[in-house]
Amino acid sequence: MVELMTVYERLVEEEDELLNKLEICEGCIACIFEYLVSKKDVHIGESVLTAVHTIAKDLQTELLHLRLEKGLLADRIKLAKYS
């Protein structure tokens, strides 16, 4: 049971880290977008914008898998508690 809780706590920390990275990506996307619009030539940095967007989507996918793992682990902990 203690081992399960330790793994769960590690997943919570990883989730927080992923959320922070996503927040940074979203801020970068907003800044790049504003910059490109102000230059009135979106094609110059479109690849940079797309690259950061791709990173954000990859992080969201990683977060999805982590949350699934965390949910399954929480269920195992609950079952172990009441067994």
Image: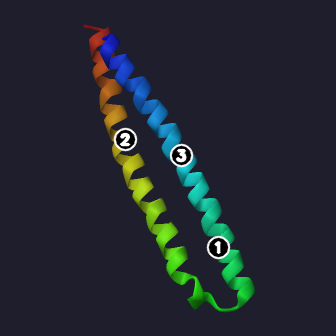
The Cα atoms of the two marked residues, 1 and 2, are separated by 28 Å
Q: Residue at x 68, y 69 (%)?
A: 31
Looking at the rendered image, the quarter that the N terminus falls into is: top left
3 or 1: tag closer to the N-terminus:
3
The Cα atoms of the two marked residues, 3 and 2, are separated by 11 Å
Looking at the rendered image, the quarter that the C terminus falls into is: top left
Residue 2, x across and y down, in percent: 34, 11
Q: Amino acid at mark 3?
A: Leu
Residue at disc 1, secondary structure:
helix
Kindly identify which residue carries mark 1. Answer: 32
Q: Is residue 64 above or below residue 41?
A: above
Q: Is residue 82 above or below residue 35?
A: above
Instruction: Answer left or right for 74 relative to 27.
Output: left
Residue at disc 2, secondary structure:
helix
1 or 2: tag closer to the N-terminus:
1
Residues at badges 1 and 2 in contact (C-beta under 8 Å)?
no
Kindly identify which residue carries mark 2. Answer: 66
- Label 3 vs label 1, nearer the camera: 1
Residue at disc 3, secondary structure:
helix
The image quadrant that residue 25 belongs to is bottom right
Kindly identify which residue carries mark 3. Answer: 19
Residue 11, x across and y down, in percent: 41, 32
